Image: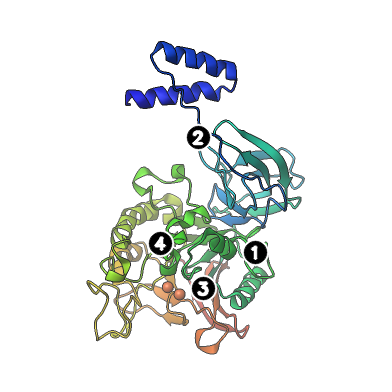
Amino acid sequence: MKRRTFIKDSAMLVAAAGAGNVLKGAERSFDKLGMTDPSVPEPVERTDNVEGKLITSAPMLQNYSENSIGVAFAVGALANGYVLISENPDMSGARKIKCGGYRLTELSDKVSQIRVTGLKPATKYYYKIGADRIHYGGGYDMKILGNEEDPRIYNFTTAGKEAKGHFCVINDTHVRWDAIDKTIAKVNSLAPSCVIWNGDASNTQETIESQVEIFLDPKISAKDYASFTPYLFSPGNHDSRGMANRHLERVWMFRQPEERNSRDWDLGRNFAVRMGDVALIGLDTAEDKMDTNPIFAGLFNSDAYRRAQVAWLQDALKRKDIAKAPFLVAFCHIPLFDSRPTSNPGDVAPDDKDPKYTHDFAIWQRTCSQLWTPLLEKAHCQLIITAHEHTYRRDDPTPGRSWTQLVGGGPRLEEAHFPTVIEGKVENGKLNITVHNVLTGQVQDSITFSPRKR
Ligand SMILES: [Fe+2]
Ligand SMILES: [Fe+2]
């Protein structure tokens, strides 16, 4: 540590003790050291927002797992959010967990994110959300202006071997509220244990406010759509487009660092969750254009990201609870297979252009397929659920490919691009997949899987 930095930091520590006298004492000791500037920070000009609601959305349950859950909600002013959580419906014995991680809470005027850890598997928890309204006038001028608690008691059940094996998948919602409203209504009528949002929730998001609207305060009738039903997220190519999406974790949190090993520090969205008889594996296919494509100006690093997920996947598949699950289902946004020779496989250097393909971007992801599917095949993965193409499709196994691929539907209430809810439910020792057509309300497709070889 440089001497100058040390002296400055020491002064701040002394000043943080609070009293002016202490500070004067510090100044005297600095004088003795030949220093006269204890580096007291200037006050910050900031107008407190004391009007209006502090908590401005229902909570969203993010990154469902066996022993932790994320709770995120929108706030309308500078806030220090928290969750009260209990195993009892009357909230007795509740513990309080504040937003943010170690060292500091996550003071924010947009979103409060609370990661609740240390939970029991397959257990029902009751929770409430609250926040302190904070005045921030500088490093030594902070106070609580008030407190707001949402009076509603919400609940959820953690994942785990004893949980109900029942999931729903939605994808490519692309901020089309009319379709999302109907899609979520369908999901809610099915009451799954969790929902996998399989990417392209975004279009191009430049502001955190627009991300808040997509995930926390959507323009749909079920404002509490994710307050009781936990969500998992497999990002799509659009979920990293726009300045705000470069830090989507400000609205959709990562898993806590202690929930993954240091090698996987940056893989905050991958998931391997045991839910009843099903193991759910979430992978991120990243962008649908090459990192070398000039329109990206060298600002994307998908290739390294895809490769980093190989070691993560290897370890996840070895985990005892995952390896022993009768059903193994993987999720990622861009398909890992396409039989059509005109479909761009996403590895056309440098700019994705080749006249033999119909599009100048990946319709499917050959690189991800080559990296990940040998591992999934070896683990006898039965089903990979993908998205991205905006048209529902089913690819049954072939002699060279042991898994079924489903490609979820599109974002529009139109026949060519109808949205789907793909439901998976374990019943009588089988995994029944039902593809619901959100436009017609009819069942579009159904498949039954027997337990995999283990
Ligand atoms: Fe899409
Ligand atoms: Fe996409």
Cα distance between the residues tagged 1 and 2: 32 Å
Residue type, numbered disc 4: Leu
**In the image, residue 57 lies at what x, y percent?**
66, 57
Image quadrant, ligand 2:
bottom left
Q: CA distance from mark 4 to mark 3?
A: 20 Å
Q: Secondary structure at mark 1?
A: loop
- Alpha carbon separation for disc pair 1 and 3: 17 Å
Q: Is residue 67 above or below residue 350?
A: above
Residues at discs 1 and 3 in contact (Cβ within 8 Å)? no
Determine whether 46 is above or below 413 in the image: above
Q: Which mark is residue 79?
A: none
Asked if residue 426 lies left or right of residue 156, the reply is left
Residue type at mark 2? Arg
Disc 3 is placed on an element classified as loop
Q: Which mark is residue 103?
A: 2
Secondary structure at badge 4 equals loop
Q: Is residue 442 visible?
A: yes
- Image color mode: rainbow
Q: Quadrant of the N terminus?
A: top left
The residue identified by callout 4 is 283
Task: Give the mark, 4 or 3, whose residue is nearer the N terminus.
Answer: 3
Q: Does ligand 1 reach within 8 Å of label 3's beta carbon?
A: yes
Q: Nearer the viewer, mark 4 or mark 2?
A: 2
Q: Earlier in the sequence, mark 1 or mark 3?
A: 3
Is residue 24 toward the left or the right of residue 359 in the image?
Answer: right
- Which amino acid, mark 3? His
Identify residue for label 3: 174
Image position of 183 with respect to 110: above or below: below
Q: Which residue is mark 1?
A: 225
